[in-house]
Image: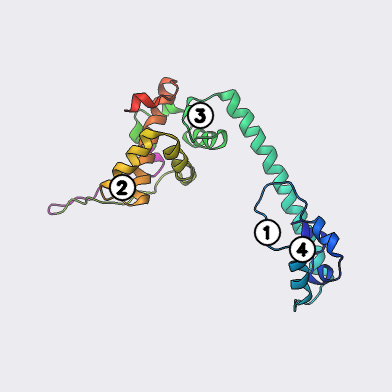
Amino acid sequence: MNILKTFASAEKIANSDIRTIRKCFEYNGRGKRISLSAKQIKAAAKASVGIPSVAEEIQIRHLVCQIEMIEEQLSEIDKKIEEFSLQNNSPILSIPGISHFSGTSILAELGDICNYTKASQIIKFAGVAPYHYESSQFLAQHTAITKKGSRYLRKTLYQIILPVINHNRVFTSYYKKKLAEGKGHRCAQGHCIRKLLRVIYHLLSTRQVFDPALLI
């Protein structure tokens, strides 16, 4: 991003002093660092067959500025979400692996827990309930999830389930048990998500703090 904002074209990089290019690498923010060095980038720019365009340089700089502005706005929103989460102090935040952001996302999608009378209803709402296929001669043993309901909630659940499994021995054991039964990785994740939703429903309904000992 710094290189694009500073030079915006291969020609500018090729004609710039190597020390100016190195300054673009002096960045303390988040993000994966590129593997190329300033010397390699300058050499690649000299060998570039791209045609310089002032209009495209301006467009590139404007796009970089827009991306930076959006990142600032997202950072501000993330801080507000964390502040709201701390004020709300939901019991689901006591579950290891659920952050303020993911916890708030789950709560926002679920809404008032009083709207549900049992855990199976939020499992269905999240679209992670398994299909039940049965006929007079056949009963399916392995079925896909329904994928009906809130796709945002389902996406968040799949994003957090591995941290939850890794940070809690009960979920770790349950996940390994499903794998031992011949379930695939994704299927085992689905079982863990349904277990997690049952836990979330109980915590929100009773306002209890998560206690892994009660799951054994």
Mark nearer the N terminus (3 vs 1): 1
Percent x, y for residue 94? 48, 27
The quadrant in which the N terminus is found is bottom right
Relative to 27, is 170 above or below?
A: above
Q: Which colour style is shown? A: rainbow
Q: Main secondary structure of the magenta part?
A: loop
Report the disc number at residue 38: 4
**Residue at left offset 74%, top offset 46%:** 28
Q: Which residue is mark 1?
A: 34
Residue 46 disc label = none
Q: Residue 93: which numbered mark, if any?
A: 3
Distance (Cα) linking label 4 and label 3:
44 Å
Quarter of the view holding residue 206: top left
Tell me if label 4 and label 3 are in contact, CB under 8 Å: no
Q: Earlier in the sequence, mark 4 or mark 3?
A: 4
Residue picked out by circle 2? 179
For the residue carrying disc 4, how many other residues have a C-alpha within 10 Å: few (<14), some (14-19), or many (20+)? some
The range drawn in magenta is 123-137
Residue 124 counted in the magenta span: yes
